[in-house]
Image: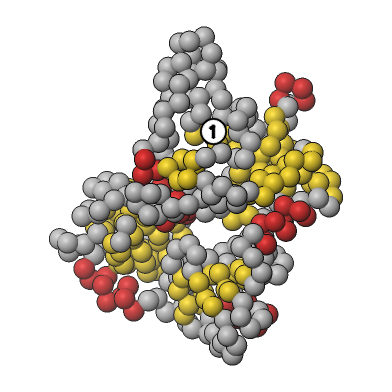
Amino acid sequence: MQVYELNVPMSTSNGGIIFANPNDQYPVAQGSFIFENANEGDDWCIFNVNPNSNTGLLPYQNGANANVINNRFFRCSWELLPGTSGSTTRITGFGKDSLPVGTGGGRNSFNATNQTHVGPFDAKSGSGNSIKIEYTVDTEPGNSGSPVIIEGTNTTIGIHTYGDCPLNGVNGGTSFDAQDLENAINNYLGPGNVYVDVDHPSIFTFGSVMNPYHTVSGAVANASSGDILKIVEGVYIESVIINKTLTLTAPVGLVVISPSPTPLQQVTNRSSKSENENSLVAIHPNPANDFITIKIKNANSKATLRIYNSTMQLVKTLYFENGSENKITVNDFANGIYFIDAHSGDQSYQTKFVVSR
């Protein structure tokens, strides 16, 4: 394990691996590994990567990776399971592919490229340090380490570690509920880190990665002096009074803390420029009825665009190439004002549109 790669191209017709662009390669931090390989329910590894030597960026900081990392991160949870609300399980990762057979009689052009499959969740079993999850999802050798995702979300419930399809039709992995894995993740950055995530699906809130506080004020109240609050991107509608020494950080994305649901003043002020020749975003029609077309222009790189409703709740996240446009159906949007927050590299732009029927 030397290099972590993203945006990996197709392999050759006989399965020969083609490495990613140098800007998409991140050296693995040797000496950062923590792992366990006791059994099927206690098999995991945690490691860190260093910034890309050309860009100086970490994977989640590089806007060009928006097409391969949903919102640049997964939320880890052990409280939710696929299937509890009609959802299914998705496994996405890099496996060794030889079906169909490649030109060399073995592996093919899909070998060691990013592939995905969806299927039913089957079971969760075990306790303590060994908790196994199983699912009828197609995987391949080499898929170990893939996130076990609740389909339609950016929430993962564990790590895929083994395949057994020829025997009983199910594959499986280690749940984040395995105590040693959960402890290793929570303690990886050292003591004094308190996690906050307004959009995390957890019911219980302890300030951990799996169970973060949903409000900044809740984290402040329970944190000890000297702690570091790691606040995940989102809009926190609350008033916060800090009466102790704390460090507040935003490790991924934009964090907005506002005492009321009134949208950001900069959005209101800049919305009239949405069709300006030099703007990053062009939208029409506005007001919208059943659809709206959004175009990204004048961007330095791939763009990430988020749509918020009038209470600043995230409604939709979209990804664009420069010059591309997307026709968005708004039939399921309630009447009202919606706000767009667009980012491309170091560029940002905010605007708004109205849904009116």
Q: Which residue is mark 1?
A: 94
Q: Residue furthest front?
A: 31
Q: Residue at x 36, y 64 (%)?
A: 341
Task: Decide which of 329, 43 is in the foreground and name it.
Answer: 43
Q: Is residue 68 visible?
A: no
Q: Secondary structure at mark 1?
A: strand
Q: Residue at x 25, y 54 (%)?
A: 299
Give the quarter of the image for residue 335. Answer: bottom left
Q: Is residue 283 visible?
A: yes
Query: Residue 269's x, y, as percent?
Result: 27, 76
Q: Which image quadrant: the C terminus?
A: bottom left
Q: Residue at x 57, y 81 (%)?
A: 246
Q: From the viewer's perspective, tell me whether residue 230 is left or right of residue 325.
A: right
Compared with 48, 95 (above or below) is: above
Give the quarter of the image for residue 8. Answer: top left
Query: Residue 6's x, y, as percent?
Result: 44, 41
Q: From the viewer's perspective, tell me whether residue 239 is left or right of residue 347.
A: right
Q: From the viewer's perspective, tell me whether residue 100 is left or right of residue 35.
A: left
Residue type for callout 1 = Phe
Compared with 283, 117 (above or below) is: above
Query: Residue 342's x, y, as percent?
Result: 33, 60
Compared with 355, 180 (above or below) is: above
Task: Decide which of 37, 320 is in the foreground and name it.
Answer: 37
Give the quarter of the image for residue 215. Answer: bottom right
Task: Decide which of 37, 252 is in the foreground and name it.
Answer: 37
Q: Residue at x 48, y 14 (%)?
A: 102
